[in-house]
Amino acid sequence: MTDTPTRTMLVTGGAKGLGAGICRRAAHAGYAVAVLDLERGDCATLVKSLPGKGHRALRANVASESEVTMAFDELDAVPDVVVNNAGIVRFGPLIEQTVDDFRLVVDVNLIGTYIVAREAGLRMVARGSGVIINMSSINALN
């Protein structure tokens, strides 16, 4: 009998909220989960609670090319699935928002999604397989 290779999933913004829920569901489905978020401690706490083995806590700002590349380099293999879930929102009237608020939202929600998808895609193409899921928010419709 041959062992089936463990499927792997990387989830950005995975330490809390919807991302943590995705990580839990993936672990229950048999994936080795890489939880990527800004705070490695939050990732490590979630990883300890996940069933199964092979889970990883990764710290990276998705808006930083170098940090994303280093996080992928920490993995033992190319993830089978990458879920681009990291995102932020700044509520309030436009006239009360700062340019820095807007830049941060664009950097995380748009540029970060691009950086992670590109890094994952480069590695997945080299391997010959992989899936990238880009999440959005109901706020995208407002």
Image (cartoon, rainbow, N blue to C red):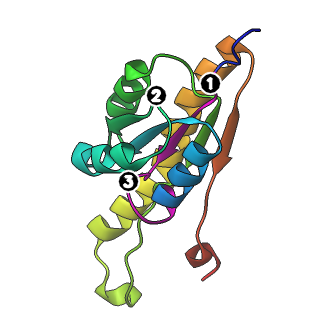
Q: Which residue is at 59% across, 36% downward?
A: 31
**Left or right placement of residue 27 versus residue 46 in this view:** right
| Figure quadrant of residue 66 | top left
Q: Residues within 10 Å of mark 3 (few under 14, many from 20)?
A: many
Please give the label number shown on residue 6. Answer: 1
Nearer to the camera, 85 or 89: 85
> Mark 2 and 1 residues: CB-CB less than 8 Å, in contact?
yes
Q: Which residue is at 59% across, 19% downward?
A: 123
| Figure quadrant of residue 7 | top right
Q: Which residue is at 52% across, 60% downward?
A: 21
The residues bearing labels 2 and 1 have C-alpha atoms spaced at a distance of 9 Å
Q: Earlier in the sequence, mark 3 or mark 1?
A: 1
The residues bearing labels 3 and 1 have C-alpha atoms spaced at a distance of 21 Å
Above/below status of 137 relative to 75: below
Image coordinates of residue 33 in percent, x first then y, are: 50, 37
In this rendering, the label closer to the viewer, 3 or 2: 2
The quadrant of the rendering that contains the C terminus is bottom right
